[in-house]
């Protein structure tokens, strides 16, 4: 890639959102040495969750897999916004790790597919520098009834 990560975002027509204000006593991101750790980011856009509920591939009244993938993408954008606010997006050297939590309906075991929403976005933006290790964990509940939460570890 030539240019900066800011250039790449513009090329992809992606605008980083404003940093989501913390819901409790923590900060959105912190730096230790050459690593930035983000707090878990919910799929918030304009102060609202983009979807709410547990994820399932076939249950009614529950967040469908496609919507959960979109929500994971929004979480990743929110995490990048936290990184940008702390150190600037152009200081990113690589995405090291993505940790994701999926509020899963009974029997749902496709958490990895949900987290692809975040992983594919990071690859689209950062190319080889976006290749990362990842954990995708199914959980009973997430804050505010969110379907997914994502945190990043980024080398700067």
Image (spheres, rainbow, N blue to C red):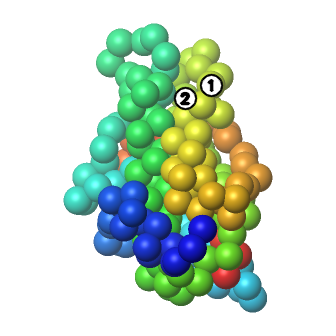
> SS class of the residue under badge 1?
loop
- Residue tagged by mark 1? 110
Viewer-closest of 77 and 25: 77
Q: Which numbered disc, 1 or 2, marks the residue closer to the eye? A: 1
Is there any visible trace of residue 53 in the rendered image?
no
Task: Judge left or right: residue 61 versus residue 113.
Answer: left
Q: Is residue 104 above or below residue 148?
A: above
Quadrant that contains the N terminus: bottom right
Viewer-closest of 114 and 41: 114
Q: Position of residue 101 (x, y in %)?
A: 59, 44
Report the Cα–Cα distance between label 1 and label 2.
Answer: 9 Å
- Residue tagged by mark 2? 104
Report the residue that reaches farthest toward the front. Answer: 2
> SS class of the residue under badge 2?
loop
Task: Judge left or right: residue 142 versus residue 101.
Answer: left
Q: Residue at x 46, y 48 (%)?
A: 73
Q: Is residue 25 above or below residue 62?
A: below
Residue 75, numbered circle: none
Q: Position of residue 54 (x, y in %)?
A: 45, 29
Quadrant that contains the C terminus: bottom right
Q: Residue at x 34, y 54 (%)?
A: 44
Q: Residue at x 55, y 67 (%)?
A: 39
Q: Residue at x 65, y 34 (%)?
A: 112
Q: Position of residue 130 (x, y in %)?
A: 65, 59
């Amino acid at each position: 890639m030539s240019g900066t990560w800011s250039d790449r975002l513009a090329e992809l027509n992606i605008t980083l959102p404003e940093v989501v204000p913390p819901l409790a006593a923590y900060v959105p991101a912190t730096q230790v040495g050459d690593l930035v750790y983000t707090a878990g980011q919910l799929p918030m856009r304009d102060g609202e969750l983009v979807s709410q509920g547990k994820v399932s591939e076939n249950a009614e009244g529950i967040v469908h897999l496609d919507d959960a993938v979109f929500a994971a993408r929004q979480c990743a954008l929110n995490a990048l916004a936290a990184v940008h606010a702390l150190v600037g997006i152009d200081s990113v050297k690589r995405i090291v790790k993505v940790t994701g939590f999926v509020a899963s309906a009974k029997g749902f075991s496709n958490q990895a597919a949900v987290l692809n929403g975040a992983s594919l976005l990071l690859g689209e933006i950062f190319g080889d520098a976006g290749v990362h290790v990842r954990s995708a964990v199914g959980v009973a509940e997430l804050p505010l009834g969110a379907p997914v939460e994502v945190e990043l570890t980024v080398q700067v």
